[in-house]
Amino acid sequence: MAEQQRPPSIKDVAERAGVSWKTVSNVMNGQVNVRPQTRLRVEQAIADLGYRRSTAGRQLRYGRSFIIALAVPELTTPYFGDLAHQVLAAAIERGYTALITETGGDADRERAALRGFDTQVADGVILSPVSLDGPSIAGAQSHVPLVLLGERVAGSPLDHVIYDNRRAAREATEHVLTEGAQHPLFVGANAEHRYGTGWLRAEGFLDALGARGSEELVVSSPRYSRAHGAQVVRELHGSGRRFDALVCASDLLAVGALHALRQLDQSVPDQVQVIGWDGIDEGRYTHPALSTVQLDVRAVARTAVDLVIDRIESAEREAPSAEVVVPHRLIARASTRIRSG
């Protein structure tokens, strides 16, 4: 019986490439401090030998899996798809990989993420919650490092990457007012759920209107989708409700609104201004091009990954929680610029 050949080791790769095993490890972990020609030699040696890293051995050596989990409401939304891509890229640069899961905005699945999924697969979790309120999040008992994306939760001991939704909504609303809007509406918040992204953006909208603002100007939408944005516009038009600007809680709602307005022969922006949120690439190609509040998705991802990995690798798990505010900027395009003449 022929002797079974042992699988190649990291030392075999290092010998074939003429480098140290540490350099091979750096290449496989995506570290940037490796010269391009050296990286090519190592990658060629890995391919020639058919080397595969021993995950079990790595876990035993370091006492962790080098995996982080990202839990988002849905990956079909361009913003969360981009976020997942950026989180994975940032994790690889730190020598980790990322598992991506959808919660569907379901409270039980979000609670499972808060608990670290009750498994030993991921060393840390990044969660974008939708359905859980402040007390639910603040009372979470997680056995793994956890970073939340969104607004700061009062009393929470967790690390947060924050978007200043209220301020950004105020700026977006002030923009359409400056461009001549007299009867704006906010689309995408539910007054029965006064927490989370949608309602905070609605509050910023009302702040900008001051004494003129009332909750009657906030229009609910069950989902942030193109179809629901179009549905809202059709219902508003059918009811005879007066409006000359729509401040939408997401770009997808705004894209749907633009579609319905065009079908109803409503000129944008002359008759109705439209502004969205997130800065997705699709907004550059709508007709007219969509004004938006753009979030720095790359900064969100890298900050969250750095926070969770630093917490994983730190001996001080009980250190004070961190709070990082990610910048935004308003991009004014043709959907809110009143045409002269």
Image (cartoon, grey):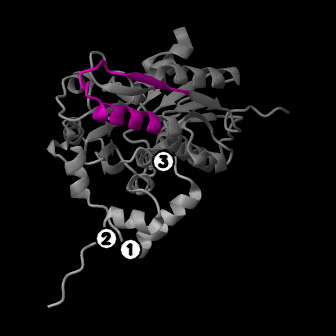
Q: Which residues are magenta?
A: 301-327
Q: Is residue 49 left or right of residue 299?
A: left
1 or 3: tag closer to the N-terminus? 1
- Label 3, label 2: how many angstroms apart (C-alpha)? 36 Å
The numbered disc on residue 82 is 3
Disc 1 on helix, strand or loop? helix
Question: Relative to 297, is 182 above or below?
Answer: above
- The one nearer the camera, 29 or 160, is 29
Q: Is residue 130 visible?
A: no
Q: Position of residue 208 (x, y in %)?
A: 56, 15
Task: Indicate which disc, 3 or 2, sits on the residue closer to the N terminus.
Answer: 2
Instruction: Say which residue label 2 marks.
Output: 8
Residue 79: % across, % down: 47, 44
The residue labelled by disc 1 is: 49
Residue type at tag 1: Leu
Which numbered mark, 3 or 2, is in the foreground of this view?
Answer: 2
Please tell me whether residue 85 is drawn above or below residue 130 in the rendered image.
below
* Image quadrant where residue 130 sits: top left
Residue shown at 23%/40% (left/top)? Answer: 113
Question: Which callout, 1 or 3, points to the residue nearer the camera?
Answer: 1
Locate residue 43, reporting x and y percent: 47, 65
Q: Is residue 328 magenta?
A: no
